[in-house]
Image (cartoon, helix red, strand yellow):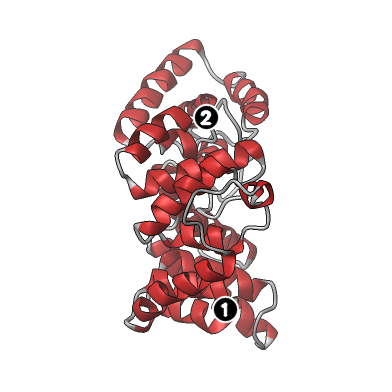
Amino acid sequence: MVLYNQYKIATPELTIAAEAGDREAQFYLAEELRQQNQYITADAKKWYMAAAEQGDYYAIFKLATSKSDLCSTMNNCPEGSKKPGEWLEHLWKIAEPKANSGDGEAMYIMYLATTKLDWLEKSAEAGYAQGQWLLANRYKEGERFFLPWKRQEVIGQWLKASAEGGFPKAMLEFSGYLYENGGDLSVARHWIEEAAKLGYETGVSSYGAYLAHAPSLYDFPLDLVKGYALTSLLTELDGGGNIKPYVDEVLPEIAAKMSPGQIDEAKVFAKQWKDSHPPLSFYPDKLGY
């Protein structure tokens, strides 16, 4: 899972866990196989089905909505495969009762399956952090009628709730919201740091850059040692994500302001951070691309 979330090839590791019956690994293995081939192959469909049979919402959603199902085209899908419409009915059958009983994630899935904004609003109100983040973005895109000043206020409220619920993308978006709307920059700095502490790649890169004043934003006090250390950690993301060109540009810029002793100190801090925080992650959306 760590490799997958860093956009690195994770097929061998995911296969071990998937074959052992781990539902989440089965879903992500299917995702990786689909992305590698740009279609749902028979092997990918087998693992989507394995996860779906264990009640995985996202695997069922993929089977219900995919328009790139190569095994259907080639007529070589695994035995027992359902048609997309049948999977969609199955998704509603298992998710709707849970949604009606107050499950925020089930409400979120019902929104994805039906595109009815009411479900997303219920998910947010139930405290599901990713639903709160997505609702803020749907409002930002113009969903629902609001007076202009009220729309911005509500967007901020849901981003704040999602950040407080632990969703790293919301943490950074809320910090940007505060910056753009004249909010408390100390609160904005807090959420950038919290996103970095969760290993979120954009949080780490932002926190490192702002500490090193490369660029100087959010009134972070200059700390070249921490800024260099955090930026250097991003060198581990050498798979997808296109982060390497950024590091290759920014790290020498920071190093040019530092003494050799400070760089040595930064290397020690980088190791301490890595040992005491979650692995770096792009936190990709489960429904992917």
Q: Which mark is residue 9?
A: 2
Q: Which residue is at the front of the view, 69 or 253?
A: 69
How many C-alpha atoms fall within 10 Å of the one at disc 2: few (<14), some, or many (≥20)?
some
Badge 1 is on which residue? 153
For mark 2, give the secondary structure: loop
Q: Which of pointers 2 and 1 lies earlier in the amino acid sequence? A: 2
Amino acid on which disc 2 is placed: Ile
Residues marked 2 and 1 touching at CB (< 8 Å) = no
Report which quarter residue 53 is drawn in. bottom left
Distance Cα–Cα, label 2 vs label 1: 41 Å
Q: Position of residue 147 (x, y in %)?
A: 67, 88
Q: Residue at x 61, y 68 (%)?
A: 137
Location of the N terminus by quadrant is: top left
Q: Which residue is at the front of the view, 136 or 70?
A: 70
When the figure is inspected, residue 155 is found, relative to residue 69, above or below; the finding is: below
Amino acid on which disc 1 is placed: Glu
